[in-house]
DNA sequence: CTAGGGTTAG
């Protein structure tokens, strides 16, 4: 414990000051948070073999903590143990906590190991330290050791150790123990339970824990709302948010961030705008602003996103920049994305893994082979980032879409990552664009090896075979699909009108105005055909992830949603639609013509890409 | 002296 450099190794000096006034002075400095004077006084006390009381020392330790004074903290530690006094458990706990907060886990652990009477706080401090450092195994191990020593965990212990649970089995066991001792009604424990179940994807259990709550606080609500938002169940997150408001709680930064994330997932631009109003009072909150920025990008409102991004002039971090760059790229504004990246390089934060992904994404979507290749080649050298599978994916996409299919395949085999289903799907997408049937079959087979539940790929494969008159192969694929119980989701489009989400599902007539909409659609198609529209049913390779062709093409869900948008939104208002499947070639042509003929901006977001239709053209440049 | 909630890609 002692060091050669320690002040305490000097011989005690003679001191004329009375013991009382020395200790009093020390106490005064501690409470005044005057660290230098307190340290001097402590030195003097030490020379006179004097000690103060434990509470005073703990004040001094707090003082060291807020100043980040590690060295002084160590001196206090030595002093407390130096006069032959045995410090009280609570003072040792304070010291352990100090080391933990300084990130010196080993020193905390040494103290912990050597202390005589470890109480629940000592154990909890260590458990919390381990779980905060992601040493989950150690945290759980300590819980077991503590129980073995007969120390009973309290709510502090449980809320700490819960965060260290990385398996459902552990979690359920722990949940059981918590119920047994009746600590589940503690708000900290409850929110930790909800959060941990959510992190492990067990939303059902999280919701049960939430619903059993009689009295809770905002954090518990935030846990459950955040849990659903992060598990891509935006509907439930939004419902809970409304419930929370009815229960009389006022949303804070955390709530709003989660609700915005839910809006992002569901493309709820109107609700997002409403939330924006509440965000204004937290306009210093970077995380919240980043979530807002992402919402505008992913809801296809680049005007709002740009406005916000420029307003956030003073405080933008790497996430803000990455979000904006990726947002521009996904919406088809690749040149702007690259321009922004250049300005980030000169006056923004250091780009990270995700930033580069956005940049490469921008290149691949605009067919900028040279730029993409350059950024890819130089990312390690310029930013110290090794290309990951996703970066390779972008470049495979870039080469493939540009028609360099051979080079794309070569890269797949050369990269130092195992290709996964996503990699092959990218190649398949390129085959679709360039109508390379043989390679498409190869890629599709690779996908199905890795992801046997991918309905779109079975259908594509069957269609390719059917198209080449290979009826037996086609039947075999369909049969496999049947035996594996793989079903294709029906095409579905959503549109938000007057704070209400309207869903259009292929083959489903449950929308109250469906007949009227279909009549309007038929008339619109007639009108478009007079200016040259020809419904295109020959998109075999297009059927990759698009809606089925055999069903009436004219009632594809996005067409119904577009017509409903024309019918129910004011003339100048952009029509925003979200789809669950890729848009098909026919609907793409249809949307371009409608945008032109009706003088409307139409934004359709499919699972991969955004299409901004304006005056007869699409922001994707017909390249998707 | 010890405890809970939020942001970019996939």
Image (cartoon, rainbow, N blue to C red):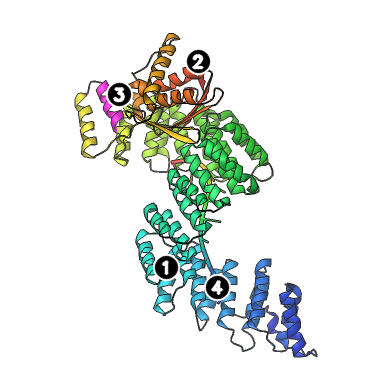
Magenta stretch: dominant secondary structure: helix
| Closer to the eye: label 4 or 2 | 2
Q: Where A164 sits versus A328, above or below?
A: below
Instruction: Decide: few, some or many residues near mark 3? Use Cα within 10 Å; few <14, some 14-19, many ≥20.
Output: few
Q: Nearer the viewer, residue A389 or A496?
A: A496
Instruction: Decide: few, some or many residues near mark 2? Use Cα within 10 Å; few <14, some 14-19, many ≥20.
Output: some
Q: Earlier in the sequence, mark 4 or mark 2?
A: 4
Indicate the quadrant where residue A291 lies. top right
Q: How far is the residue under mark 2 from the one under mark 3?
A: 26 Å
Q: How far is the residue under mark 3 from the one under mark 1?
A: 55 Å
**Residue under numbered circle 4:** A108
Q: How far is the residue under mark 4 from the one under mark 2?
A: 72 Å
Please tell me the numbered disc located at residue A140: 1
Span colored in magenta: A458-470
Label 2: chain letter:
A
Instruction: Decide: few, some or many residues near mark 1? Use Cα within 10 Å; few <14, some 14-19, many ≥20.
Output: many
Label 3: chain letter:
A
Are dots 2 and 3 in contact, CB under 8 Å? no
Instruction: Give the side of residue A181 with respect to residue A322, left or right.
Output: left
Please tell me the numbered disc located at residue A551: 3
Q: Where A80 sits versus A578, above or below?
A: below
Check chain identity for marks 4 and 2: say if they share one.
yes
Are dots 3 and 1 in contact, CB under 8 Å? no
| Closer to the eye: label 3 or 1 | 3
Q: Is residue A350 visible?
A: no
Q: Nearer the viewer, residue A313 or A424?
A: A313
């Amino acid at each position: 414990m002692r060091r050669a450099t320690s002040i305490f190794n000097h011989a005690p000096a003679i001191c004329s000051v009375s013991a009382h006034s020395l200790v009093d002075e020390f106490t005064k400095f501690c409470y005044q948070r005057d660290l230098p004077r307190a340290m001097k006084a402590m030195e003097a006390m030490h020379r006179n073999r004097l000690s103060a009381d434990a509470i005073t020392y703990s004040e001094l330790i707090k003082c060291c903590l807020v100043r980040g004074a590690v060295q002084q903290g160590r001196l206090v530690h030595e002093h407390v143990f130096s006069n032959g006094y045995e410090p009280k458990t609570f003072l040792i706990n304070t010291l352990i906590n100090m080391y933990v907060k300084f990130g010196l886990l080993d020193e905390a652990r040494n103290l912990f190991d050597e202390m005589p009477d470890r109480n629940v706080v000592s154990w909890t401090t260590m458990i919390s330290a381990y779980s905060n450092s992601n040493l989950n195994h150690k945290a759980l191990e300590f819980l077991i050791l503590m129980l073995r020593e007969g120390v009973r965990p309290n709510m502090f212990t449980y809320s700490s150790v819960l965060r260290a649970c990385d398996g459902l089995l552990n979690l359920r066991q722990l949940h059981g123990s918590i119920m047994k001792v009746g600590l589940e009604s503690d708000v900290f424990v409850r929110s930790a339970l909800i959060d941990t179940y959510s992190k492990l994807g067990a939303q059902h259990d999280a919701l049960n824990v939430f619903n059993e709550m009689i009295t809770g606080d905002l954090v518990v609500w935030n846990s459950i709302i955040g849990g659903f938002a992060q598990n891509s169940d935006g509907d439930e997150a939004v419902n809970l948010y409304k419930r929370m408001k009815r229960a009389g709680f006022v949303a804070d930064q955390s709530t709003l961030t989660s609700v915005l994330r839910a809006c992002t997932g569901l493309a709820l631009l109107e609700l997002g705008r409403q939330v924006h109003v509440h965000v204004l009072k937290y306009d210093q909150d970077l995380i919240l602003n980043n979530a807002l920025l992402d919402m505008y990008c992913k809801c296809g409102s680049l005007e709002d996103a740009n406005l916000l991004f420029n307003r956030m002039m003073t405080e933008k971090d790497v996430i803000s920049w990455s979000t904006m760059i990726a947002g521009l790229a996904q919406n088809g504004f690749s040149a702007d994305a690259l321009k922004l990246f250049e300005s980030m390089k000169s006056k923004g934060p250091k780009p990270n893994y995700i930033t580069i992904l956005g940049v490469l994404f921008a290149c691949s979507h605009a067919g900028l082979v040279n730029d993409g290749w350059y950024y890819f080649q130089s990312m390690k050298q310029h930013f110290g980032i090794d290309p990951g599978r996703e970066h390779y994916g972008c470049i495979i996409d870039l080469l493939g879409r540009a028609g360099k299919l051979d080079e794309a395949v070569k890269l797949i085999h050369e990269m130092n990552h195992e290709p996964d289903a996503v990699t092959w799907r990218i190649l398949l997408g390129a085959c679709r664009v360039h109508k390379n049937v043989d390679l498409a079959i190869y890629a599709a087979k690779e996908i199905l090896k890795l992801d046997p539940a991918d309905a779109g790929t079975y259908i594509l494969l069957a269609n390719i075979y059917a198209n080449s008159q290979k009826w037996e192969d086609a039947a075999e694929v369909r049969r496999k699909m049947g035996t594996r119980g793989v079903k294709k989701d029906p095409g579905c489009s959503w549109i938000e009108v007057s704070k209400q989400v309207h869903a259009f599902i292929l083959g489903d007539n449950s929308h109250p105005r469906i007949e009227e909409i279909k009549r309007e659609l038929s008339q619109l198609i007639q009108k478009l055909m007079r200016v040259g529209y020809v419904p295109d049913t020959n998109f075999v390779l297009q059927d990759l992830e698009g809606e089925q062709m055999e069903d009436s093409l004219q009632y594809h869900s996005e067409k119904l949603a577009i017509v409903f948008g024309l019918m129910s939104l004011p003339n100048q208002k952009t029509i925003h639609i979200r789809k669950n499947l890729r848009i098909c070639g026919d609907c793409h042509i249809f949307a371009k013509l409608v945008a032109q003929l009706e003088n409307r901006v139409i934004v359709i977001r499919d699972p991969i890409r955004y299409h901004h239709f304006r005056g007869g053209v699409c922001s994707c440049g017909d390249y998707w």
